[in-house]
Every structure is written in C-alpha cells, then in structure tokens.
Image (spheres, rainbow, N blue to C red):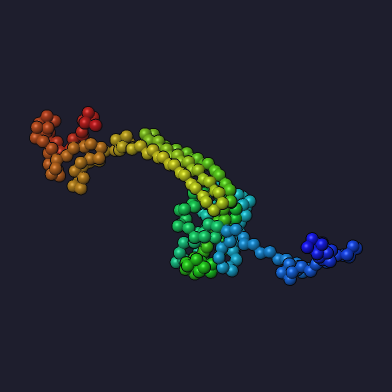
C-alpha cells in the first residue's frame, strides 16, 4: 500500500519544467475599468435639491466681526429676511437638522461655525414649514472649545445707583454632540425718589406718598386732630419721620 501511494503521488505531481497554471474562480476574476467615481455626502448639508442663495465660510463669518450667532444674524438681517411683513420668522438648522428654536444656538460663539448657508423659501418645504420662510443652516465645527465672559456696568448720571451684569459661557463641540454651560448675575440697586428730592402729594388715587408721606384714609381730611393741634394748624399731609425708615 505504501508503494501505491507513492506512485499515485508521482502521477499527480507535474513533470519537471512544466509550468503550473490555475484559473481563478469566476467570482475572483477582475476587470480593468476606466475610472471610479466616489460620491460622499457633505457634512451638514440640507435636505432636498434646493441650493443656497448665499454661503459664508468660516473666514467670511469672522470678517463680519460678529461674536455670537445672535450678533451674526443681526448683521445679516438684510440677506436673511425676505422683506415681506407677513412672512414668518426664518427657519434655523444646525448641521442640516431642525432644532427647538433660535434660542438654542443664539448664544453660541461665531467661531464655532464652519459654514453658514442662507437658502430660499422653497427649502422650508423639505422640513415641514411654510413655503414663504427662509432657511438658515449653520454647520458647526467637529471639535471646538471656548470660554467667554462679559461684564457690563451702568451708572446714573446724578449718582445714587450703579448696576452690574456679568455672564460667562463655556461651550464644547465633539462631533455631533455639543454642551453649553452659562452663568449670569445681575445687580440692580433701588433708586428712591427721595434721592432725587422728588415729593409726591397724596391724591384720590394715591392717598400715601411714595416717599413716606402720610395722609388720612379719607382724601382731604386731617390726619389727626392731636397732630393738627401740635402743628398749630390743620394737617392733611405729613412727612414720615426719618426714624420710621
């Protein structure tokens, strides 16, 4: 049996010098093509075939001088609004998708925008809106971080009051995820009329003065006969003592 096996191997083996050829299966055969066209979807592109009327790159957005999305929209109001007083507000999109409203992105820094597109009213139909609404699409950068702060102070020209407002915003982009944390504080002290020497006499609609004047519950009547006796005359209006404050 060993001899037969060896003979079988010798018969199956090719003769010396004979080239070995093999035909690949039909599924593995290749063909030469002239060219290959690869189509890739543009990130943040809007739905439908409607092309934008205006497209701004990141460099062009920076050139407007806007610091936030709200500021950018204000500067481009003439291009965004149709001028029709009966037209609804524009539709705002982020990366080609609907959002809850403009307030969701109004405070974002303009540096986070990679591309801005202003589309005609026909594009609104693709998102279920009315055909007379403009569409504004913001394509955000894939990775972005920012920390912004602002402090405002105001004072009365004659003194007596200084109001302060301070806010800080932290914004982060990571792919399609974005996170925003905002903190705002205000201080608006009260400015009394007494600080401006304003004295209001009681009237039928306001029997008590706003700066502490006293009057009778009956308009025009004296406050108290005893007070009139001390004053030496009929007292209808009296200034509250400073200790009462």
Residue 96 screen position, x and y as percent: 54, 60
In the displayed structure image, the side of residue 55 where residue 88 appears, left or right: left
Residue 137 found in image quarter: bottom right
**Quadrant holding the C terminus:** top left
**Foreground pick, 143 / 25:** 25
- The residue located at (73%, 67%) in the rendering is 28
**Foreground pick, 234 / 156:** 156
Residue 206 found in image quarter: top left
Residue that extends furthest to the right in the rendered view of this protein? 17
In the displayed structure image, the side of residue 71 where residue 218 appears, left or right: left
Residue 127 screen position, x and y as percent: 50, 66
Q: Is residue 157 above or below residue 123?
A: above
In the displayed structure image, the side of residue 39 where residue 78 appears, left or right: left
- The residue located at (15%, 38%) in the rendering is 236
- The residue located at (47%, 44%) in the rendering is 181
Residue that extends furthest to the bottom in the rendered view of this protein? 26
Residue 176 screen position, x and y as percent: 54, 53
Q: Is residue 20 visible?
A: no
**Foreground pick, 112 / 20:** 20
- The residue located at (30%, 38%) in the rendering is 193
Q: Is residue 186 visible?
A: yes
**Quadrant holding the N terminus:** bottom right
Residue that extends furthest to the front in the rendered view of this protein? 1
Residue 44 found in image quarter: bottom right
Residue 152 screen position, x and y as percent: 46, 39
Question: How many marks do you count on the picture?
Answer: 0
**Foreground pick, 136 / 82:** 136
């Amino acid at each position: 049996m060993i001899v037969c096996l060896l003979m079988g191997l010798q018969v199956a083996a090719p003769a010396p010098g004979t080239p070995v050829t093999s035909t690949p299966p039909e599924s593995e055969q290749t063909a030469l093509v002239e060219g290959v066209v690869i189509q890739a979807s543009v990130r943040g592109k809007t739905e439908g075939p409607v092309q934008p009327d205006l497209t701004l790159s990141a460099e062009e957005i920076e050139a407007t001088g806007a610091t936030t999305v709200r500021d950018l929209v204000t500067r481009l109001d003439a291009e965004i609004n149709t001028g029709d007083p009966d037209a609804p507000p524009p539709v705002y999109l982020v990366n080609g998708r609907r959002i809850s409203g403009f307030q969701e992105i109004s405070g974002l820094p303009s540096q986070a925008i990679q591309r801005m597109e202003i589309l005609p009213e026909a594009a609104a139909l693709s998102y279920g809106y009315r055909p007379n609404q403009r569409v504004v699409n913001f394509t955000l950068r894939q990775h972005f971080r920012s920390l912004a702060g602002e402090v405002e102070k105001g004072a009365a020209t004659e003194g007596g009051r200084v109001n302060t407002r301070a806010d800080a915003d932290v914004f982060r982009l990571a792919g399609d995820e974005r996170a925003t944390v905002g903190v705002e504080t205000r201080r608006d002290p009260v400015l009394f009329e007494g600080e401006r020497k304003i004295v209001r006499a009681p009237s039928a609609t306001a029997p008590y003065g706003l700066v502490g004047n006293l009057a009778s519950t009956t308009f025009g009547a004296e406050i108290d006969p005893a007070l009139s006796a001390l004053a030496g005359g009929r007292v209808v209006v009296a200034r509250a003592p400073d200790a009462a404050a």
